Amino acid sequence: MSAAVRHEKTYLVRYVPAQIEGAASEIIEDAYIPESADHGRLRLRHRGDRYQLSKRFATDQADFSTLSELTIELTGEEYAAFRSLTAKVVRKRRFYCTIYGRPAEVDVFLDELDGLMIIDFPFNDAAEMSGFQPPEVCLADITQEPVADGGYLAGKTYGQIQYELERFDYVPQFIEKEY
C-alpha cells in the first residue's frame, strides 16, 4: 500500500493542446464504489497490466487542490471481484506531456463523455502551486468543481454534465486522429 499527497490544479481546455501530438498516452478505466453513491470515493483503476484500489480525499474540505491518496495494488483476480460491484465507470485517454515547461496530464474522455477534455497540472507542494499562471490553452479552473472529479463523472453522459460546462463557455473538444 502506498500513501501520497497530491497537489494539482484542473482546467477545462480552451482548445486541443498541440503538445499531445507524439506524447506518451494510455487508456485508463476508473470504476467507482459504491455504485449507489452520487460521488463514489473508492476508485478501481485499470491501466495496461496494472490494477489498483484507491481512496482520495481532500486534506481540507474547502480546497480540492491538495488530496491525500491511499493506493493498494491489486491482482487481476482481485480487480475483477471489486469491479463486479459497480457499473459506474469512466474511461479516458491520458496524455503525459509538457505544456509551456510544466508537466501536464491531458485527459480526453471517451464513450459517453466524449467531448470532455481537461488538463491536470501536478505540483511538488502548495507554494509551487500558488504561483502557477495557467497557459492560454486553459479555459477555466475547475479544481473546486464536482465536474473535475472522476467519482462524480462516472456513469454520466456528456449531456448530463453539459449545463455545468456551459457556465464556463466550454465547447466540446475532440481529437481528430487515433492515438
Image: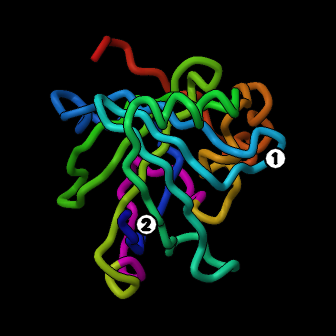
Side (left or right) of 34 relative to 71: right
Identify the disc placed on residue 8: 2
> Which disc is residue 149 wearing?
none
Q: Amino acid at mark 2?
A: Glu
Instruction: Identify the disc placed on residue 38.
Output: 1
Disc 2 crowd, CA 10 A, few/some/many (<14, 14-19, 20+): many
Q: How is the image coloured?
A: rainbow
- The CA distance from mark 2 to mark 1 is 23 Å
Q: Indicate whether residue 138 is drawn in magenta.
A: yes
Q: Residue furthest bottom?
A: 127
Q: Nearer the viewer, residue 179 or 11?
A: 179
Q: Seen in the image, is 51 located left or right of residue 149?
A: left
Please identify the quadrant where the C terminus is shown: top left
Q: Tell me: 32 left or right of 118.
A: right
Side of 25 relative to 163 (left or right): left
* Residue 161 location (% of width, % of height): 75, 36
* First in residue order: circle 2 vs circle 1: 2
Is the C-beta separation of discs 2 and 1 under 8 Å? no
In the picture shown, does residue 47 fall above or below 60? above
Q: Nearer the viewer, mark 2 or mark 1?
A: 1
| Secondary structure under the numbered disc 2 in the rendered image | strand
Above or below, 55 against 80 in this view is below
Residue closest to the eye, 53 or 92: 53
Quarter of the picture containing the N terminus is: bottom left
Residue at 60% in and 68% down: 57
Q: Residue 80: image x %, image y %?
A: 52, 28
Q: For the image shown, how many numbered marks are present on the structure?
A: 2
Q: Percent x, y for residue 84? A: 64, 27
Is 61 situated above or below 106? Answer: below
Question: Could you tell me the amino acid type at mark 1?
Answer: Asp
Q: What is the x, y in percent for residue 157?
A: 72, 25
Q: Where are the magenta residues, as a range?
A: 129-142
